[in-house]
Image (cartoon, grey):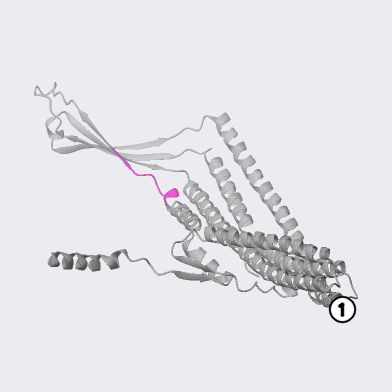
């Protein structure tokens, strides 16, 4: 029995490392580390990269010649003319002809087919880049929202502590006969309402953390650090509309995909127009009689493009597809420029609002609350003045947090439109 126990223990020790859990990995804290992790691990972005690579592999086969054909014809396999039994071996029948043929497209068709496939590869590459930029934008937005939630929770806790102090003052004044019970009850009601808001903020923070895990591909053995700080805004010189518009025209992935689609449509139109000319099929045929080659034949074959109605319809279709691609690009460009202008205006408003709140409204609200508290403790102000001052402080802090969050949202939108970091 003792030997059996020792054996079981040794087996458990041997199996332990194979089933040991992988150590937790700590990521986050700053948005750059989250973007780096998502770029290397997110399955959807990996799928887009694979699709782009697959599209690139289609370029070379598109311009290659078709495989040659080999045809074998066995003549007089019944050997009626030779007064022999049927056979399938070429030396023992009336004869055999071997035809080697190669199809040759008209001049320029192979290059055009390769160009169409190359445009498709460029479009797939642009779609992969657009997919990454969209994913990166959502990560930036979720990071900023999570940071805003955490700051809001901190302010809510500070506001709640402050209101509890106000409630304690109200109870002390009521116990001393200088206040009324209504002040204490109103303070308690305010505390309950603020505790409810705090619970909701904590729930939103947990939801933001869950969204971030989803954006990272729901990795296992990963612990997310809370966001430490918001990204710095670029200098004003980089937020010039004309400069950003130029960068948008060059780097926007949607426009790059549209350009590739236009290029593919142009080459597709040219390829269809080349179908007016015939393709050529060349062949050579040696004929075997018994054990020797008795004769050689050459073959020249072309297709005759007689179906002009069908071909003209294909050409009109190609022209319309090209026109649609150009119009779609113009529409996407107009939409992108409008969104860029809107995001820039929103960023400027949010930045100005943050400056006004942080330098004017918030300090004034803090001074008003301190003065109201002091006056209430000394009986020179009523409780309504304290509540009003406290609500002004809460509103100022909320507007400050919202303005900073709006700036991050607008910055992420601008970077998505211009296709690169600012």
Which residue occupies 62% across, 37% down?
316
Nearest the eye: 5 or 306: 5
**Which residue is at the far left?**
84
Relative placement, left or right, of 308 versus 5 is right
Q: Is residue 133 visible?
A: no
Nearest the eye: 273 or 350: 350
Residue 245, quarter of the rendered image: bottom right
Q: Position of residue 159 (x, y in %)?
A: 73, 70
Relative placement, left or right, of 9 versus 207 is left
Q: Position of residue 25 (x, y in %)?
A: 45, 70
Magenta residues, as a range?
A: 61-70
Relative placement, left or right, of 354 versus 316 is right
Q: Which residue is mark 1?
A: 378
Nearest the eye: 21 or 392: 392
| In the rendered image, the vertical position of residue 354 relative to residue 291, given as above or below | below
Q: Position of residue 326 (x, y in %)?
A: 66, 48
């Amino acid at each position: 029995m003792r030997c059996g126990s020792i054996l079981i223990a040794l087996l458990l020790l041997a199996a332990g490392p194979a089933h040991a859990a992988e150590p937790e990995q700590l990521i986050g804290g700053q948005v750059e580390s989250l973007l780096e992790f998502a770029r290397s691990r997110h399955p959807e972005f990996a799928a887009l990269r694979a699709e782009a690579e697959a599209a690139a592999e289609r370029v070379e086969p598109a311009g290659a010649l078709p495989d040659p054909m080999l045809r074998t014809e066995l003549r007089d396999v019944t050997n009626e003319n030779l007064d022999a039994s049927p056979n399938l071996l070429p030396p023992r029948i009336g004869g055999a002809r071997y035809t080697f043929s190669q199809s040759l497209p008209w001049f320029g068709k192979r290059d055009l087919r390769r160009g169409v496939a190359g445009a498709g590869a460029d479009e797939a590459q642009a779609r992969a880049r657009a997919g990454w930029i969209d994913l990166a934008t959502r990560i930036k937005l979720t990071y900023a929202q999570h940071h805003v939630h955490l700051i809001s929770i901190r302010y809510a806790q500070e506001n709640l502590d402050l209101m509890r102090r106000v409630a304690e003052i109200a109870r002390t004044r009521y116990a001393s006969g200088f206040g009324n019970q209504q002040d204490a009850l109103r303070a308690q009601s305010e505390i309950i309402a603020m505790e409810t808001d705090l619970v909701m903020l904590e729930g939103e923070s947990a939801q933001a953390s869950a969204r971030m895990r989803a954006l990272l591909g729901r990795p296992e053995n990963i612990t997310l650090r809370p966001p430490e700080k918001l990204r710095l805004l670029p200098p004003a010189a980089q937020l010039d509309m004309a400069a950003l518009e130029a960068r948008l025209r060059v780097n926007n992935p949607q426009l790059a995909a549209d350009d590739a689609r236009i290029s593919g449509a142009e080459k597709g139109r040219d390829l269809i127009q080349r179908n007016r000319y015939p393709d050529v099929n060349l062949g050579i045929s040696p004929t075997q009689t018994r054990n020797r080659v008795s004769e050689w034949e050459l073959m020249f074959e072309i297709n005759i493009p007689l179906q002009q109605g069908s071909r003209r319809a294909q050409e009109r279709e190609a022209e319309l597809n090209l026109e649609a691609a150009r119009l779609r690009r113009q529409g996407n460009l107009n939409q992108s420029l409008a969104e860029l202008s809107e995001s820039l205006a929103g960023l400027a408003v949010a930045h100005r609002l943050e400056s006004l709140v942080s330098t004017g409204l918030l300090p004034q609200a803090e001074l008003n609350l301190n003065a109201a508290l002091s006056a209430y403790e000394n009986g020179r102000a009523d409780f309504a003045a304290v509540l009003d001052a406290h609500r002004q402080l809460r509103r100022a802090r909320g507007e400050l947090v919202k303005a900073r969050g709006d700036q991050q949202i607008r910055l992420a939108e601008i970077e998505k439109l211009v296709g690169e970091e600012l």
